[in-house]
Image (tube, grey):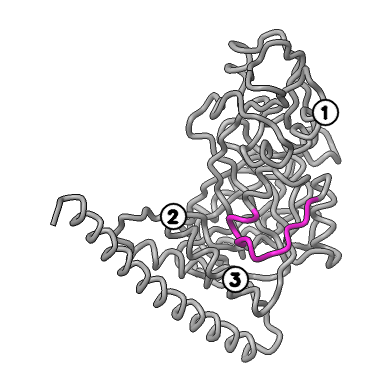
Amino acid sequence: MSRKTRGEADIAALRGEIDAIDQRLLESLNRRAALARRIGELKAGAPAYRPEREAQILRRMAAANRGPLGNERIAAVFREVISSCRALEQSLRVAYLGPAGTFSEMAALKQFGHAVQALPFASFDEVFRAAETGGADFAVVPVENSSEGAVGRSLDLLLQTPLRICGEIRLRVHQNLMRKVSGKKAGTAGVKRVYSHAQSLGQCQRWLAQHLPHAERVPVSSNAEAARLASREASACAIGPEIAAGRYGLKLLAARIEDEPNNVTRFLALGAIDPGPTGRDATSIVMSAPNQPGAVHALLSPLARHRVSMSRFESRPTRVGQWEYYFYADLIGHRSDAPVAAALAELEKLAPFLKVLGSYPVAD
């Protein structure tokens, strides 16, 4: 038998193994789906989405993974399996900042999988309102970027909403320059303006200064809106995610133009549920302090006393009086954990205003 013939025989044998594994996978997936549907029947109307349960599954799979697939790919596969099985019990509607093709859409699908109805809205206010009024089951909104800081409107709306934080998504953000082109040549010649969300423009300042120093930078409501506008103007470009280029018929001129290579945006999933503890959780709060010396130090004392760590602490003006602020903090631990519960009980007595925004599994 020639070397070529032996190679073809080896490939055929390996493909036969793959076919057998695929058959077992199919049977296991349908068995899993049947069990999930049965659990849904036994839950008698309880929420189909259990973020703590889903987080535990994904963490268990990552811990057991031995490759060659990396944990990120394994998580993506199991996220879609979970999403498809969950849809047998309930078809979720998830609101996000649209139009289609934004980083917010990517975050929503990363958290909930593709077996949901993703609903784009034109503003943060509409995203919140949809979930508050029953137009959507959950909302996904950005709250901070590793290079550009907090998303102020999201923080302001968290102060007012009855929704609770039930999940966290950390999305590696890659910014791309895209343009509508005709013919084979594509470049930046003749570009007069660049559309993008203000946060994205800020994340690409050095690149724009070097490559498009004379182009006008035009902030718009979303990256997808930027792509839509650029698709209608021959002299315009847009900055945003690669999926926006595909949605609006644009060609990528330059990929990964963000100034910081480790550019991450943190999103929150909001809904009317309270996830249980998983052992790796966070609790987000907002509070006020009396306008007097040492007031903020006094608020932090219960956290230190009960050895509760913080992963974030920042202030926002109250817009009620001058030099008065709300303080947003992310605590490490679930609100039902004894140290966190004790610290919150003390804070409730000290702070003029305290709101627990939610406890939820931290993003891995």
Instruction: Give the mark toward the camera: 1 or 3.
Output: 1
Instruction: Tell me the SS state at disc 3.
Output: helix
Q: Quadrant of the N terminus?
A: bottom left
Q: Amino acid at mark 3?
A: Ser
Tell me if mark 1 has few (under 14), some (14-19) or many (20+) residues whose alpha carbon lies within 10 angstroms of its own. Answer: few
What residue is pinned by disc 3?
Answer: 84
Of residues 157 and 205, the one nearer the viewer is 205
Q: Secondary structure at mark 1?
A: loop
Q: What segment is highlighted magenta in the picture?
A: 108-120
Residue occupying the point 56% across, 61% down: 343
Say whether residue 184 is magenta: no
Pick the front one: 3 or 281: 3
What residue is disc 1 on? Answer: 232
| Mark earlier in primary sequence (2, 1) | 2
Residue occupying the far top of the picture: 214
Does the magenta run of residues contain 110? yes
Residue type indicated by callout 1:
Arg
Alpha carbons under labels 2 and 1: distance apart:
36 Å
What label does residue 73 carry, if any?
Answer: 2
Residue at image point 41% right, 76% down: 23
**Disc 3/disc 2 C-alpha distance (Å):** 17 Å
